[in-house]
Image: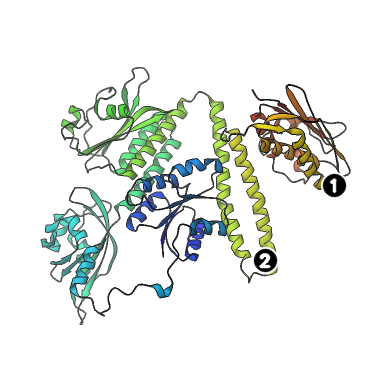
Amino acid sequence: MATVLVAEDDQDHQRLIAGVIRRLGHNVTVADDGRAALVAAAHRRPDLVVADVDMPEMDGLQLCRALRGDPVFADVPVVLVTALPAYDDRRLHDSGATAVVHKPFTLQELSAALAGHLIAPAAPGDAPPPLLQEPAMDSAFVEALLQSADTGLAACDSSGRMVMMNSVVRGFFGEDSAGIPLERWTEHFSLRHHDGSPLGPDDLPMRRALAGEVVEHAGLLANDRRGRPRWLTINARPVRDAGGAVIGAVAAVHDFTVEYKSRLYQMCTTEVLKALAESKSAAEAHQEVVRTVGGTLGWRYVRLWLVDPVTGRLRIEATYTGAGERPLPAPASIARGQGLAGLCWQRGELVWVPDIHAEGAPILPEVAEGARFRAAGAVPVRSGGHVTGVLTFFSYDPQEPEPALALLLTGIAGSVGAHLQQHRADDLEHHLAAATDEYIALVGHELRTPLTSIGAYIEMLAAAPELEPDLRALAEVVDRNSRRLRELVDQLLDLAALDGGHLTLLSGRVDLTELVGAAVAAARGPAAERRITIDTNLAPEVTVTGDVGRLRQVVDNLLDNAVKFSHDDSVVTVQLAGDDEAVVLRITDRGIGLRGEDRPAVFRRLYRGDNVRHSGIPGNGLGLALCRAVVEHHQGTITLSREHPSGTAVTVRLPRTPG
């Protein structure tokens, strides 16, 4: 039986994927984002990781790269689940993913994708024999079990003398900690509550257990032997003899520093983004950023340096100083390579200084002499592909280059850089166009995600034999409409990809005469149902250079519109002609026509004229926008004009060979 780690922030999808894995006969561990997944993986190595690409804090691509970069998890298969379009597959596989499952998916598709990476569970008769055959475990086995546990375990007698302490506790508090009486632990180890307030001797969980209390999840803040703060939770309970008297106490110590910091980092990111969004000016935003970073992470001194475009040197833009701290000395400006900030600027990468007083530390002498801090660091701020600033910090606690903190600082610096770039942007029109594409892609993704849940759960309902016929009919209606909505999302993302230049069209010789003829043949069936005739006048062997699939998509859309908007018992005319330089396709109908005020907007995404919307004719306003995008990619033009007394003519002009 395998252990599968599922990283998915959408709770419906999380339950769905976990349910499929359990039905395959395997154990499941779930996490709400990439950081929590790394913590879960460290606690118990998974046999397979299933991760959604789009998650807060650490997404699926970052999680996959983090696992591949760790020798412990490098060989664990990772299956990515994504609503991103297929043209992003190369980026997904470059992350090290073993396989990719695209949303929307069916239960069968997901089961098949995961089953190939899982070992079938053993039959009940194949279970290994129990480790111990004797009813009682001897003391040697108990000792081995205690020392192999990755949770800290300790016990004391009724006087508070430590009688047992496993290697986890000794490794944290030191080998001599067993000889320290329990009443002295609070003072000796400077134990505190999670908020940093002092812990009284009687507040120690094991002391409370000796008093007869059962303690669950008591919070404790302590420094390990290297001086690093660690956040612990402790469960403790009294040990009683047969008469009920307390003869000692036991405690289990859980180090949840990683989880605590993950929540802390998430809160810091949220507050930074809020500060950037709500500040009325760049200066106010920068001051709020350093205050938020310093206050949230407990750093007593944080500076933001920005490159002065006039002098080409770093100058202080914003400073945060903790309450009661003396301001650090600082020069008016710093050159590239000078001090901590200048070195970070020069390297263009995050710089850690575990000990600012060590020989060779990149700290300015006047800063090192006047500072009581222990560690420092700096992260570059990038804007428009260039380093435009540096964020530096100083801390009393040892600060090592942990990946999660590095990711947080890089993200914050990136947000500050993006904020700077936005303030310096000159081309507003280009910015708005890019924002529109990103918005459409985001909307498409956010629609695909719930659609996957709807489709999958409808499948599960339909498979239930006890479903009543009337409820089954309702389920079919939901399924039919979800499919229509899925087609709309696919068209929306397809259009965004075309307009954004993310898709590359194929290029080859296309026989337009043959292509248009095939499209007309396909359209005649629906047209005949309303007694609509399609007349053609196609010049022979009209060829262009282009993408045959995309050009067929254009012709199909235009014919579908012509038939859809035509009156019953009418005629649709299709003409194809060309000369040595260009070809012309003209499709004319005798339908409801096009109002003059609608003509400038008719090729916009999701636009439908009033006469069309009120006619009851189905549509989503994307067909003509897709046609325009494809035709323009072929360096052609597409226009609409009114026909008299009624109807519309669509004219497409394409070059024989695009330049």
Q: Position of residue 436 (x, y in %)?
A: 57, 35
Instruction: Identify the amino acid type marked 1.
Output: Ala
Instruction: Give the Cα separation between the discs numbered 1 and 2.
Output: 35 Å
Q: Position of residue 100 (x, y in %)?
A: 50, 49
* Label 2 secondary element: helix
Task: Report the residue at 13% width, 62% height from top.
Answer: 178
Which label belongs to residue 528?
1
Whether residue 97 is visible here, answered yes or no, is yes
Quarter assignment of residue 87: top right
Instruction: Identify the amino acid type marked 2.
Output: Leu
| Earlier sequence position, callout 1 versus callout 2 | 2
Q: Nearer the viewer, residue 198 or 76?
A: 76
Which label belongs to residue 471?
2
Whether residue 292 is visible here, answered yes or no, is no
Task: Report the residue at 33% width, 36% height from top.
Answer: 290
Q: Nearer the viewer, residue 593 or 3?
A: 3
Q: Is residue 381 left or right of residue 446?
A: left
Q: Is residue 63 left or right of residue 165?
A: right
Q: Position of residue 361 (x, y in %)?
A: 20, 32
- Quarter of the picture containing the N terminus is bottom left
- Is the residue marked by circle 2 packed among few (<14), some (14-19), or many (20+) residues within 10 Å? few
Task: Report the residue at 27% width, 69% height from top.
Answer: 214
